Every structure is written in C-alpha cells, then in structure tokens.
Amino acid sequence: MAGYEKMGQSEVESVQADFRSDTVTRATPEMREAMAEAAVGDDVFGDDPTVLRLQDLVAELTGKEAALFFASGTQSNLAAVLSHCQRGDEFLIGSEYHVFVDEAGGTAVLGGVVPFPLEVDANGSLTAEAVQEAVKPNDLHYPLTRLLSLENTVSGAVQPQSLIDQLGRVAKEAGLRVHLDGARLFNAAISTNQLIAAFLDNVDTVSICLSKGLGAPVGSVLAGDAETIARALRLRKILGGGMRQVGHLAAAGIYALGHNVERLAEDHANAERLAKGLGSVDQLEVRQATNMVFVTAPADDRQSLYEHVVSRGLLIGAPYPAMRIVCHLDVDSQAVDLLIEADQT
Ligand SMILES: Cc1ncc(COP(=O)(O)O)c(C=O)c1O
C-alpha cells in the first residue's frame, strides 16, 4: 500500500516543478485579489453573501436544488454518506475509491456506517451486476444497504455518463441512494465535452473539489436535493466544519469556476504529451488519463529512477509500484519538457 511522503523544507526549496498532485497549486494574484475583496458575513448564521453565491452557482452548475460549502472533499464526502445512511447501514463503493481507501475510514469511525467494497476494472469502473448482487436482502444477519458511492474521475479515468446513469438506475431500483465523489468531475466533463450536470441525472448528491485542478486553495461543495443538504448542514456542524467569514475562501472558488474550468484541457494535453515522451523510454510502462500519468519502471530500477527525477527538483509520486505524475495549473509545458528529459537521461 502506498504511503504519503512528507517533504523536508530543504527539498521543497529546490523544487522546479511539483507533479505530485493537482492539490499543490497556489492561488494566483488575481485569485488572491478576489479573496481579499470578498464581501463576508457569518456563515454559521447563514449570512455570508459570497458563500451563498458560490453555493447557488454550484447548485446551478450541477442541476441540483441546493449546495453547501465544505472545508475539504473528505468532509463533504463524509457528510454526504452520513446524510444518506444511519448507524448500522452499509454503502457499496469501488474498492479503489477515495472514500474507501483514503479518508481514514471516517464513515465507520464517526458514523457507524460500513463500506462494502466492490472490485473495479482497469478503468476504475463498477458493473451494474456487481452492484445488484451486493445489495443485501432484508435479513437480520446483514446491515441494511442504503447507498451506492461512485467516483469520477477515478485516478484520472473518466467514468462515462452512460455508466453513471446505468449504475444510478440500478441502485435506485434496489432502493439505494447514490453519491458521487466528483472531486475531479470537471476533468471528466472537459475531456468528454459535456457539462457536469450531464453526469448527475441519476445521482442524489455530488461532491465537487475546488482545490484540485480548479486551483483554489481550499474547499469543496456538496450539491443535492434540499432535504439531504439540510441534513448535511447539521452534520457539517457536528464535524466541526461550520466556518465564519469564509466568504474569503468561497471567493477563490467562484474565481476558479469562472476562470479555471476550460483550461483543464491544457492539463490533459500536457499529460498526453508527457505520456508520449515517457512512452518512448525503453522499459517504462506508461498510462495516461485526463491530467494524470502513471509510470511503471522495472522493479529493480523504480527507486533509483524516482530518486534521479526528484534530485532534479521535479517532484512526482513515489513508485508504489507506479509513479503518479499529475498535470495542473502550476506546471507548464517547459516543466513537462524537463520531466521528459529527466527520464531520458
Ligand atoms: C477522488 C478524491 N476524492 C476526494 C478527495 C478528498 O479531498 P480533500 O483532500 O479536499 O479532503 C481527494 C483528494 O485528493 C480525491 O482525490
């Protein structure tokens, strides 16, 4: 299982480009100006005008009744699962999805809600059959299956609208609700030339991250029907996520939605070029999806190749077993060239 590296300060200072994740972007001067100038109020009292504006904007973009600003994607996903499920319920989820693997088991720890993982294919997709089979009969030996939790993109891989629709319909027929972790749903939308709402007809709640490819420093928004979002508001307070003059952060999100959506295509193009360049290096196995590239080197060379690249000030994900390389707002085509060159020498 992969771990997360902590960078020492000296290493950070020598960095030329940081490809570890699209979460590393820094707010641009224009975004900082929008944050500084934001009109604010007390959001726990519900009267921060900039937060209300962001929530309205995301409700509109997702085609949902209501939306709610959260400090992080983890908090938004957790509030979503807990707003759909009670203690002792279970939810079905892809075995590689972030909510199952990377959110510290929060649904079970804080909500008594048990994940039931389903195998995913190489594209990160679930099948309708697996979902149908996993729904438990109403028998006292089993937890009650309440929710299907999806993700898009999955490690960069787009889950097509037709699949999300099919899985959503199957879940509904079985009486389940459907949540979508859409941390990078805009990447899926841009790469398929669709609006994000197109993916959401059969989804009850969706969590969108502003702090990944969109380049805001903080924040996620959960959208859904008004009743579920009202439950999520109470849960957000329980989770310690009620923030006050948070319009300064919401302003970064509004700026990101206005300026950084279409440009995701540049990240996808950079990732494609990177994959092509690295693909020409002998013995490297390269896979690319939207803004992510995964590179697998022969087992004996993995660590030395990783150290060689990092020693050149190019940060990438550690080789467990693939090195993850992510393109984003703060890496340009020059940085892509440096990385290709580093792998070739
Ligand atoms: C697919 C996915 N969902 C959710 C999250 C959680 O977001 P956050 O880091 O804001 O808690 C991440 C973070 O990387 C993610 O990649």
Image (cartoon, rainbow, N blue to C red):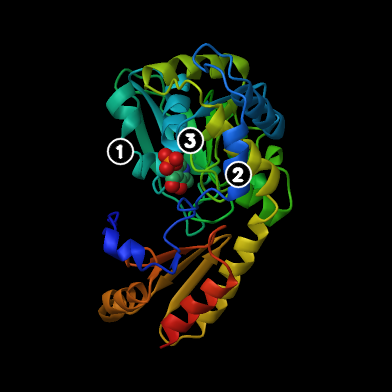
Residue 214: horizontal and vertical position, in percent?
58, 47
* Residue 104 circle label: 1
**Does residue 123 sit above or below 110 in this rendering?**
below
Task: Please say whether residue 142 is visible from this viewpoint.
Answer: no
Q: Which residue is mark 3?
A: 149
Element assignment for label 3:
strand
Residue at left offset 56%, top offset 27% = 247
Q: Residue furthest top?
A: 45
Q: Quadrant of residue 115?
A: top left
Disc 3/disc 2 C-alpha distance (Å): 32 Å
Q: Which residue is mark 2?
A: 31
Q: Earlier in the sequence, mark 3 or mark 1?
A: 1
* Residue 147 circle label: none
Residue 112: horizontal and vertical position, in percent?
31, 22
Q: Quadrant of residue 79?
A: top left
Mark 3 touching mark 2, by CB under 8 A? no
Q: Quadrant of the N terminus?
A: bottom left
Q: Is residue 243 left or right of residue 171?
A: left
Element assignment for label 1:
loop
Q: Earlier in the sequence, mark 2 or mark 1?
A: 2
Q: Residues within 10 Å of mark 1 (few under 14, many from 20)?
A: few
Residue at left offset 57%, top offset 50% = 28
Mark in the foreground, 2 or 1: 2
Residue at left offset 57%, top offset 57% = 329
Residue 218: horizontal and vertical position, in percent?
48, 39
* Amino acid type, callout 1: Ala
* Amino acid type, callout 3: Ser
